[in-house]
Amino acid sequence: MRRREFIGFVGGAAVWPLSAHAQQPLRSRRIGALIQNAENDPWARRYQTVFEQGLDKLGWKVGGNLLIDYRWSISGPDEAKAAVAELLKLSPDLILANSLSAVRAAQQATRSVPIVFTAVSEPVIQGFVTSLAHPGENITGFSNLETSVASKWLELLKEIAPRVRRVALIMSPASGPVTQLFYRAIEKAAPDAGIETVLIPVHDLADIQAAMTKIGKEASDFGLIVPPDTFLGFYYKEIAEAALRLKLPAVFAFRYYATAGGLLSYGPDVPDQFRRATTYVDRIFRGEQPGDLPVQQPTKFEYIINLKTAKALGLIVPTTMLVAADEVIE
Protein backbone atom coordinates (compact mmCIF):
# COMPACT_ATOMS: atom_id res chain seq x y z
CA MET A 1 0.00 0.00 0.00
CA ARG A 2 1.31 3.43 -0.91
CA ARG A 3 2.10 5.85 1.92
CA ARG A 4 -0.52 8.41 0.78
CA GLU A 5 -3.20 5.72 0.57
CA PHE A 6 -2.21 4.37 3.99
CA ILE A 7 -2.48 7.83 5.60
CA GLY A 8 -5.89 8.36 3.98
CA PHE A 9 -7.04 4.95 5.23
CA VAL A 10 -5.91 5.64 8.79
CA GLY A 11 -7.42 9.15 8.74
CA GLY A 12 -10.72 7.81 7.46
CA ALA A 13 -10.76 5.09 10.08
CA ALA A 14 -10.19 7.66 12.80
CA VAL A 15 -13.30 9.52 11.70
CA TRP A 16 -15.59 6.47 11.77
CA PRO A 17 -16.14 6.33 15.55
CA LEU A 18 -16.88 10.06 15.68
CA SER A 19 -19.43 9.83 12.86
CA ALA A 20 -21.02 6.78 14.41
CA HIS A 21 -21.21 8.55 17.76
CA ALA A 22 -22.87 11.62 16.23
CA GLN A 23 -25.55 9.47 14.65
CA GLN A 24 -26.39 7.47 17.75
CA PRO A 25 -29.90 8.01 19.10
CA LEU A 26 -30.35 9.90 22.36
CA ARG A 27 -30.23 7.71 25.43
CA SER A 28 -33.66 6.99 26.92
CA ARG A 29 -34.59 9.21 29.86
CA ARG A 30 -37.31 9.35 32.51
CA ILE A 31 -39.08 12.42 33.93
CA GLY A 32 -41.19 12.60 37.06
CA ALA A 33 -43.73 15.42 36.67
CA LEU A 34 -45.57 16.98 39.60
CA ILE A 35 -48.60 18.98 38.40
CA GLN A 36 -50.73 21.24 40.59
CA ASN A 37 -54.02 20.58 38.77
CA ALA A 38 -56.22 17.49 38.76
CA GLU A 39 -55.63 15.04 35.91
CA ASN A 40 -58.99 15.78 34.25
CA ASP A 41 -58.57 19.56 34.47
CA PRO A 42 -58.35 21.15 30.99
CA TRP A 43 -55.42 23.32 32.05
CA ALA A 44 -53.49 20.28 33.27
CA ARG A 45 -54.01 18.69 29.87
CA ARG A 46 -52.83 21.88 28.19
CA TYR A 47 -49.65 21.93 30.26
CA GLN A 48 -49.02 18.28 29.42
CA THR A 49 -49.55 18.84 25.70
CA VAL A 50 -47.31 21.91 25.53
CA PHE A 51 -44.57 20.16 27.50
CA GLU A 52 -44.60 16.97 25.46
CA GLN A 53 -44.80 18.79 22.13
CA GLY A 54 -41.84 20.97 23.09
CA LEU A 55 -39.76 17.96 24.04
CA ASP A 56 -40.75 16.18 20.85
CA LYS A 57 -39.36 19.07 18.78
CA LEU A 58 -36.06 18.69 20.63
CA GLY A 59 -35.82 14.98 19.85
CA TRP A 60 -37.38 13.51 22.99
CA LYS A 61 -40.24 11.24 21.99
CA VAL A 62 -42.68 10.13 24.69
CA GLY A 63 -42.99 6.36 24.37
CA GLY A 64 -39.71 6.25 22.45
CA ASN A 65 -36.62 7.60 24.15
CA LEU A 66 -38.61 9.35 26.88
CA LEU A 67 -40.95 8.21 29.63
CA ILE A 68 -42.90 10.71 31.76
CA ASP A 69 -44.52 9.67 35.04
CA TYR A 70 -47.16 12.23 36.02
CA ARG A 71 -48.49 12.89 39.48
CA TRP A 72 -51.53 15.17 39.55
CA SER A 73 -53.40 17.22 42.15
CA ILE A 74 -50.30 18.42 43.99
CA SER A 75 -52.24 20.97 46.03
CA GLY A 76 -50.31 20.96 49.30
CA PRO A 77 -47.27 19.70 51.23
CA ASP A 78 -48.67 16.26 52.08
CA GLU A 79 -49.66 15.43 48.51
CA ALA A 80 -46.31 16.71 47.24
CA LYS A 81 -44.24 14.71 49.72
CA ALA A 82 -46.07 11.46 48.91
CA ALA A 83 -45.82 12.02 45.16
CA VAL A 84 -42.10 12.80 45.27
CA ALA A 85 -41.44 9.63 47.28
CA GLU A 86 -43.30 7.58 44.65
CA LEU A 87 -41.41 9.17 41.77
CA LEU A 88 -37.96 8.73 43.31
CA LYS A 89 -38.60 4.99 43.56
CA LEU A 90 -38.83 5.01 39.75
CA SER A 91 -35.31 6.49 39.44
CA PRO A 92 -36.16 9.55 37.32
CA ASP A 93 -33.44 11.43 35.45
CA LEU A 94 -35.22 14.72 36.19
CA ILE A 95 -38.17 16.09 38.17
CA LEU A 96 -40.49 18.74 36.75
CA ALA A 97 -42.18 20.62 39.60
CA ASN A 98 -45.21 22.80 38.84
CA SER A 99 -46.05 24.26 42.23
CA LEU A 100 -44.45 25.69 45.31
CA SER A 101 -45.30 22.60 47.37
CA ALA A 102 -43.87 20.34 44.68
CA VAL A 103 -40.57 22.23 44.53
CA ARG A 104 -40.18 22.24 48.30
CA ALA A 105 -40.91 18.51 48.59
CA ALA A 106 -38.60 17.60 45.71
CA GLN A 107 -35.70 19.69 47.00
CA GLN A 108 -36.05 18.25 50.49
CA ALA A 109 -36.08 14.71 49.11
CA THR A 110 -33.12 14.83 46.71
CA ARG A 111 -29.98 16.86 46.10
CA SER A 112 -28.85 14.72 43.17
CA VAL A 113 -31.81 14.41 40.77
CA PRO A 114 -32.10 17.57 38.64
CA ILE A 115 -35.22 19.67 39.34
CA VAL A 116 -36.79 22.11 36.88
CA PHE A 117 -39.65 24.20 38.27
CA THR A 118 -42.37 26.29 36.66
CA ALA A 119 -44.70 28.96 38.06
CA VAL A 120 -42.92 29.55 41.39
CA SER A 121 -42.84 33.09 42.78
CA GLU A 122 -39.77 34.61 44.43
CA PRO A 123 -37.58 31.44 44.39
CA VAL A 124 -34.66 33.27 46.04
CA ILE A 125 -36.72 34.57 48.96
CA GLN A 126 -38.17 31.11 49.46
CA GLY A 127 -34.70 29.59 49.61
CA PHE A 128 -35.04 27.35 46.56
CA VAL A 129 -32.09 28.92 44.73
CA THR A 130 -29.05 30.93 45.78
CA SER A 131 -29.66 33.56 43.09
CA LEU A 132 -31.51 33.85 39.80
CA ALA A 133 -28.25 34.02 37.84
CA HIS A 134 -26.59 31.13 39.67
CA PRO A 135 -29.24 28.82 41.20
CA GLY A 136 -26.71 26.34 42.55
CA GLU A 137 -27.01 22.62 43.37
CA ASN A 138 -29.57 20.55 41.44
CA ILE A 139 -32.33 23.06 40.72
CA THR A 140 -33.37 25.74 38.24
CA GLY A 141 -36.53 26.84 36.49
CA PHE A 142 -38.97 29.57 35.58
CA SER A 143 -40.20 32.03 38.15
CA ASN A 144 -43.72 33.36 38.43
CA LEU A 145 -44.23 36.83 39.83
CA GLU A 146 -42.43 39.41 41.91
CA THR A 147 -44.40 40.96 44.74
CA SER A 148 -44.25 44.36 43.02
CA VAL A 149 -47.08 43.19 40.73
CA ALA A 150 -49.47 43.40 43.70
CA SER A 151 -49.87 47.16 43.27
CA LYS A 152 -50.91 46.53 39.67
CA TRP A 153 -53.67 44.16 40.82
CA LEU A 154 -54.91 46.82 43.23
CA GLU A 155 -54.88 49.45 40.50
CA LEU A 156 -56.85 47.24 38.11
CA LEU A 157 -59.40 46.34 40.78
CA LYS A 158 -59.97 49.99 41.64
CA GLU A 159 -60.29 50.90 37.96
CA ILE A 160 -62.84 48.23 37.09
CA ALA A 161 -64.79 48.52 40.38
CA PRO A 162 -64.49 52.13 41.67
CA ARG A 163 -66.89 51.44 44.54
CA VAL A 164 -64.37 49.13 46.25
CA ARG A 165 -63.11 50.55 49.54
CA ARG A 166 -61.91 47.34 51.21
CA VAL A 167 -59.89 44.52 49.69
CA ALA A 168 -59.61 40.98 51.06
CA LEU A 169 -56.69 38.76 50.16
CA ILE A 170 -57.07 35.06 50.90
CA MET A 171 -54.06 32.83 51.46
CA SER A 172 -53.01 29.39 52.63
CA PRO A 173 -50.46 29.53 55.48
CA ALA A 174 -49.11 26.15 54.33
CA SER A 175 -48.01 27.66 51.03
CA GLY A 176 -45.18 29.58 52.67
CA PRO A 177 -44.23 33.21 53.26
CA VAL A 178 -44.60 34.59 49.74
CA THR A 179 -48.36 35.21 49.88
CA GLN A 180 -47.79 37.35 52.95
CA LEU A 181 -45.22 39.33 50.97
CA PHE A 182 -47.85 39.95 48.29
CA TYR A 183 -50.24 41.08 51.01
CA ARG A 184 -47.69 43.49 52.46
CA ALA A 185 -47.13 44.97 49.00
CA ILE A 186 -50.89 45.48 48.61
CA GLU A 187 -51.12 46.88 52.13
CA LYS A 188 -48.39 49.41 51.34
CA ALA A 189 -50.08 50.60 48.13
CA ALA A 190 -53.64 50.61 49.52
CA PRO A 191 -53.68 53.96 51.42
CA ASP A 192 -52.86 55.92 48.25
CA ALA A 193 -55.91 54.32 46.63
CA GLY A 194 -58.11 55.00 49.66
CA ILE A 195 -58.48 51.28 50.38
CA GLU A 196 -58.35 49.18 53.54
CA THR A 197 -56.96 45.65 53.39
CA VAL A 198 -57.83 42.38 55.13
CA LEU A 199 -55.76 39.18 55.09
CA ILE A 200 -57.77 35.97 55.47
CA PRO A 201 -55.94 32.66 56.03
CA VAL A 202 -57.70 29.52 54.78
CA HIS A 203 -56.87 25.86 55.28
CA ASP A 204 -59.40 23.96 53.18
CA LEU A 205 -62.23 24.47 50.70
CA ALA A 206 -64.76 25.00 53.50
CA ASP A 207 -62.59 27.85 54.83
CA ILE A 208 -62.43 29.43 51.38
CA GLN A 209 -66.18 29.29 50.93
CA ALA A 210 -66.88 30.59 54.43
CA ALA A 211 -64.42 33.48 54.04
CA MET A 212 -65.80 34.54 50.68
CA THR A 213 -69.40 34.27 51.90
CA LYS A 214 -68.58 36.45 54.89
CA ILE A 215 -66.96 39.26 52.92
CA GLY A 216 -69.59 38.97 50.19
CA LYS A 217 -72.42 39.53 52.66
CA GLU A 218 -70.67 42.04 54.87
CA ALA A 219 -70.69 45.04 52.54
CA SER A 220 -70.96 46.06 48.91
CA ASP A 221 -67.63 47.89 49.00
CA PHE A 222 -65.49 44.73 49.31
CA GLY A 223 -63.22 43.47 46.56
CA LEU A 224 -61.03 40.37 46.40
CA ILE A 225 -57.46 39.68 45.26
CA VAL A 226 -56.29 36.08 44.83
CA PRO A 227 -52.47 35.88 44.60
CA PRO A 228 -50.39 32.98 43.27
CA ASP A 229 -50.87 30.16 45.77
CA THR A 230 -50.61 26.42 45.08
CA PHE A 231 -53.51 25.53 47.35
CA LEU A 232 -55.84 28.24 46.03
CA GLY A 233 -54.92 27.40 42.45
CA PHE A 234 -56.18 23.87 42.94
CA TYR A 235 -59.64 25.30 43.72
CA TYR A 236 -59.63 28.00 41.05
CA LYS A 237 -63.02 27.01 39.63
CA GLU A 238 -64.74 27.07 43.01
CA ILE A 239 -63.16 30.43 43.89
CA ALA A 240 -64.08 32.09 40.59
CA GLU A 241 -67.65 30.75 40.77
CA ALA A 242 -68.07 31.88 44.40
CA ALA A 243 -66.85 35.39 43.58
CA LEU A 244 -69.41 35.65 40.79
CA ARG A 245 -72.22 34.23 42.91
CA LEU A 246 -71.46 36.61 45.77
CA LYS A 247 -70.99 39.54 43.37
CA LEU A 248 -67.44 40.16 44.57
CA PRO A 249 -65.23 42.10 42.13
CA ALA A 250 -62.05 40.06 42.05
CA VAL A 251 -58.61 40.18 40.47
CA PHE A 252 -56.60 36.99 39.97
CA ALA A 253 -53.00 36.13 39.12
CA PHE A 254 -53.75 33.65 36.34
CA ARG A 255 -55.84 33.33 33.20
CA TYR A 256 -57.53 30.11 34.31
CA TYR A 257 -59.50 32.03 36.95
CA ALA A 258 -60.90 34.38 34.30
CA THR A 259 -61.84 31.54 31.97
CA ALA A 260 -63.69 29.92 34.90
CA GLY A 261 -65.77 33.06 35.45
CA GLY A 262 -63.40 35.33 37.35
CA LEU A 263 -63.67 39.05 36.62
CA LEU A 264 -60.09 39.88 35.69
CA SER A 265 -56.65 38.30 35.66
CA TYR A 266 -53.18 39.71 35.23
CA GLY A 267 -50.14 37.47 35.36
CA PRO A 268 -47.70 35.25 33.49
CA ASP A 269 -48.54 32.85 30.68
CA VAL A 270 -48.14 29.52 32.52
CA PRO A 271 -48.30 27.24 29.43
CA ASP A 272 -45.44 29.32 28.00
CA GLN A 273 -43.37 28.43 31.06
CA PHE A 274 -43.91 24.73 30.36
CA ARG A 275 -42.88 25.33 26.76
CA ARG A 276 -39.70 27.12 27.81
CA ALA A 277 -38.95 24.47 30.46
CA THR A 278 -38.42 21.91 27.71
CA THR A 279 -35.24 23.72 26.63
CA TYR A 280 -33.78 23.31 30.12
CA VAL A 281 -34.79 19.65 30.26
CA ASP A 282 -33.04 19.10 26.94
CA ARG A 283 -29.88 20.92 28.03
CA ILE A 284 -29.70 18.97 31.28
CA PHE A 285 -30.20 15.66 29.47
CA ARG A 286 -27.34 16.61 27.15
CA GLY A 287 -24.95 17.20 30.03
CA GLU A 288 -25.41 20.68 31.49
CA GLN A 289 -25.84 21.16 35.23
CA PRO A 290 -29.14 22.65 36.46
CA GLY A 291 -27.35 24.88 38.98
CA ASP A 292 -25.51 26.56 36.08
CA LEU A 293 -28.70 27.46 34.20
CA PRO A 294 -30.13 30.82 35.34
CA VAL A 295 -33.68 30.99 36.65
CA GLN A 296 -35.71 32.77 33.99
CA GLN A 297 -38.41 35.30 34.74
CA PRO A 298 -41.71 35.59 32.84
CA THR A 299 -41.47 36.98 29.33
CA LYS A 300 -45.20 36.89 28.56
CA PHE A 301 -47.90 38.46 30.74
CA GLU A 302 -51.62 38.11 30.08
CA TYR A 303 -54.31 40.64 30.92
CA ILE A 304 -57.75 39.04 30.65
CA ILE A 305 -61.15 40.64 31.29
CA ASN A 306 -64.31 38.55 31.56
CA LEU A 307 -66.87 41.00 30.21
CA LYS A 308 -69.72 38.58 30.82
CA THR A 309 -68.85 38.51 34.53
CA ALA A 310 -68.45 42.29 34.64
CA LYS A 311 -71.99 42.70 33.31
CA ALA A 312 -73.31 40.18 35.83
CA LEU A 313 -71.68 42.25 38.60
CA GLY A 314 -73.20 45.44 37.25
CA LEU A 315 -69.82 46.92 36.32
CA ILE A 316 -69.16 49.16 33.35
CA VAL A 317 -65.68 48.36 32.07
CA PRO A 318 -63.82 51.47 30.86
CA THR A 319 -62.93 51.43 27.17
CA THR A 320 -59.28 51.99 28.09
CA MET A 321 -59.24 48.67 29.96
CA LEU A 322 -60.92 46.78 27.12
CA VAL A 323 -58.42 48.15 24.62
CA ALA A 324 -55.46 47.28 26.85
CA ALA A 325 -56.61 43.71 27.55
CA ASP A 326 -54.98 40.80 25.74
CA GLU A 327 -58.33 39.04 25.67
CA VAL A 328 -61.92 40.00 26.48
CA ILE A 329 -64.18 37.04 27.28
CA GLU A 330 -67.73 37.71 26.12
Image: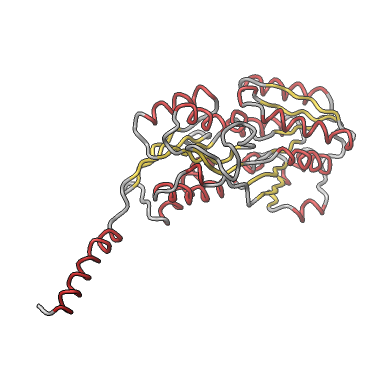
Q: Quadrant of the N terminus?
A: bottom left
Is 88 drawn above or below residue 14 in the view shown? Answer: above
Residue 65 in percent (x, y) is at 32, 48
- Number of marks in picture: 0
Residue 130 in percent (x, y) is at 58, 37
Q: Residue at x 72, y 25 (%)?
A: 212
Find the residue positioned furthest to the left: 1
Q: Residue at x 39, y 50 (%)?
A: 286
Find the residue positioned furthest to the front: 3
Give the color scheme: rainbow, by chain, secondary structure or one colour. secondary structure
Whether residue 190 sits left or right of residue 275 in the image: it is: right
Is 31 drawn above or below residue 299 in the view shown? Answer: above
Whether residue 108 sits left or right of residue 261 in the image: it is: left
Residue 230 in percent (x, y) is at 59, 31
Q: Residue at x 83, y 43 (%)?
A: 159
Q: Nearer the viewer, residue 141 or 56?
A: 141
Whether residue 206 sits left or right of residue 286 in the image: it is: right
Q: Nearer the viewer, residue 48 or 82?
A: 82
Residue 43 in percent (x, y) is at 54, 42
